Image (cartoon, rainbow, N blue to C red):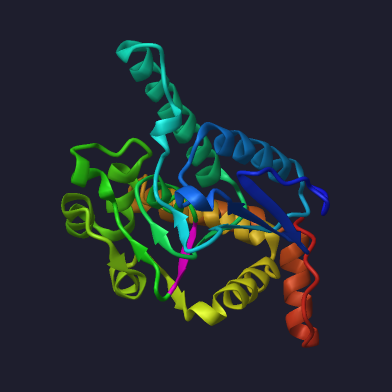
Amino acid sequence: MASGTPTSDELLVERRDDVVWLTLNRPTVLNAVDPAMLTALRIALDGIEADSAIRLVVLTGTGDSFCTGSDLRVVSGEDDDAHERCVERFIEDVNAVLNRVERLPLPVIAALNGTTLGAGLELALCADLIVARSDARVGDGHARFGLLPGGGASARLPRRIGTAAAKWLSFTGDLIEAERLVAWGLVQWVFPPAEFQEGVNRLAARIASRSPLGLQRMKSLIDSALLVPLEQALSNEQKMLRMHRSSWDRAEGLAAFADKRTPKFRGE
């Protein structure tokens, strides 16, 4: 992905060294997801997956909202049946994009710049780390309107914060302050509003400076660990460790440690 990657009206794509920032950009509707935004996200993900020099992705939003859900007002059909088919296709498209975000082999940070609801929460759950402005509020508003989640919240949220906490968010529909959600394990760090951009920049740069190959393999091990029995997860770690011993990045890391210098990783 070149540094001059064009932006769209719905999604701003910015390359900062080896980090790509994807900024949801529909502030007049609180960055609600629509088909055009999904298309822009798919194109951006194509570029990220094709560019081995990218080491980390940051997801954020413009204004004072990260994303407040899906904009179903723009999904319509000629009659009720056609409308429901359009909605179903839209939800399928949302899931396809969210699944791609979750499966990116490189680290992904969701930087919640403000209100996060519904599909916004579901998008954040696909990131590896969630950080937020201290004044951001996060919730799952489906219950308020008799709706069910359609972007994976019922599956990903309990895996992230446990069953009881997931039910609290899902049943109440409450918006909860990001600072409180640190204790729940949903948000990993909060920044004061005035320090948010710089704080996320520093975090992204710090993680991006690590071995790309090491991060990719750690992400794979951690993501798969809860899907298999403990014995299998431990075995997978040892297999990956044996494979990793022949990597250039491992040798460079050990050499840098011995020489008391900063390693220069190649992702090999």
At x 73% / y 55%, what residue is drawn? 54
Q: Which x, y percent locates residue 268?
A: 77, 55
Q: Nearer the viewer, residue 222 or 149?
A: 149
Above or below 20: residue 250: below
Majority secondary structure of magenta residues: strand
Q: Does the magenta stretch include residue 146?
A: no
Range of residues picked out in magenta: 128-133
Q: In this view, which residue lies farthest toward the front?
A: 28
Q: Which of 23 and 258 is in front in this view?
A: 23
At horizontal 72% and vertical 46% (from top left) the residue drawn is 7
**Side of 135 relative to 213 (left or right):** left
Q: Which residue is drawn at 20% across and 46% down?
A: 144
**Residue 52 x/y as whole percent:** 76, 49
Give the x, y percent position of residue 80.
30, 14
In the displayed structure, 117 sits above or below 263; it is above
From the viewer's perspective, is 157 left or right of 208? left
- The answer to whether residue 216 is visible is yes
Residue at position x 81%, y 71% from top? 264
Asked if the magenta segment contains residue 130, the reply would be: yes
Q: Can residue 247 be seen in this view?
A: no
In the picture shown, does residue 90 fall above or below 8? Answer: above
**In terms of depth relative to the viewer, which is nearer, 117 or 48?**
117
